[in-house]
Amino acid sequence: MEFRITPAGWRRLAALAVGMLLLYASFEYGRSLAGYSAYSSLMQRQALASRVDELTRKTGELERGIVAGAVSLQVDQEAQSETQAMIGELQAELARQQQELEFYRGLVEEKFGSGTLKVQELSIRDRGEARFAISVTLVQTATRDAIASGSLTLTVNGSRGGALTQLRLGEIAEDSRDRVQFKVRYFTTVEVPVKLPEGFEPAAVQLEYRSNRSGPEPISQNFPWAAALVDDAPPALTPGTPSE
């Protein structure tokens, strides 16, 4: 059976379509009277979509920043832990060194007493061609961490051509100085290079020193030359009792 639309049916359909168009136009007209604009609405939707995209991008950046900050914080915490551990090790090492210092200070005080500056040892090394290096080691235990300062000089007693002879430091020092300045906190070694004249036979070294720890008068000590003469090994001579 064939279905056909009559002319009257087409007219009714056309009238219905025109009515719907008029109805939609009336609807849009009504919305326009109320202040609504389809174009403005479209532009607003596009602006909101752009804003959403921008906020999404910023959110991603913030999330990446939070991750980087967390990593940096972890690195800083690890570095801080390592630094604290290093500080602890240094403090422990300092404590050990302080204990060792107190131990050696006690040994020095036990052997040499306290309250003054003293000569621990004097040694002489032969450098050949009548040249010698006279080394004087000074120790002081007067006051914790105090520095003793002063000067020393020496005279070499001996004989020349059968006659007793005294040679002062200014006569035999290779740099012609007649006195050596020193500063001592715990101990120090002063080396004095000398050159003896030809034909001179040394017998003893007379050492004189004074400091702000020993009073205004110099302290004098005598050291036999033969006993003080050593090879290149460290000196091992303990001096006698000082005399003023």
Image (cartoon, grey):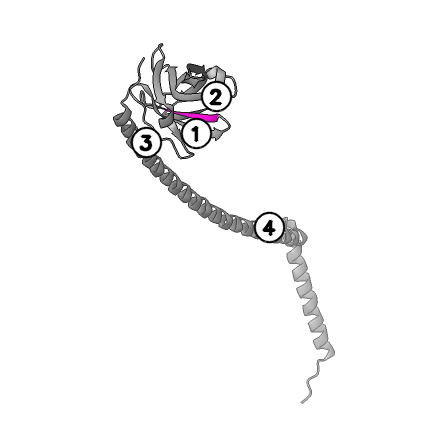
Going by the numbered disc 1, the residue's amino acid type is Arg
Mark closer to the observer (4, 2): 2
Between 89 and 127, the one nearer to me in the picture: 127
Q: Position of residue 73 (x, y in %)?
A: 46, 45
Q: Name the residue at the right extreme.
A: 7
Mark 2 or 1 closer to N-term? 1
Say if mark 1 contacts mark 4, CB within 8 Å.
no
Q: Which residue is mark 3?
A: 101
The quadrant in which the C terminus is found is top left
Answer whether labels 2 and 3 touch (C-beta < 8 Å): no
Q: Secondary structure at mark 1?
A: strand
Residue placed under numbered mark 1 in the picture: 125
Q: Earlier in the sequence, mark 1 or mark 3?
A: 3
Q: CA distance from mark 2 to mark 3?
A: 47 Å
**Residue 130: image location, x then y, percent:** 49, 25
Which of labels 2 and 3 is toward the front? 2
- Going by the numbered disc 4, the residue's amino acid type is Glu
Mark sitting earlier along the chain (1/4): 4
Work out whether mark 2 precedes mark 3 in sequence or the reverse, and give the earlier one: 3
Q: Which residue is mark 2?
A: 199
Q: Nearer the viewer, residue 143 or 136?
A: 136
Please tell me whether residue 136 belongs to the stretch shown in magenta. yes
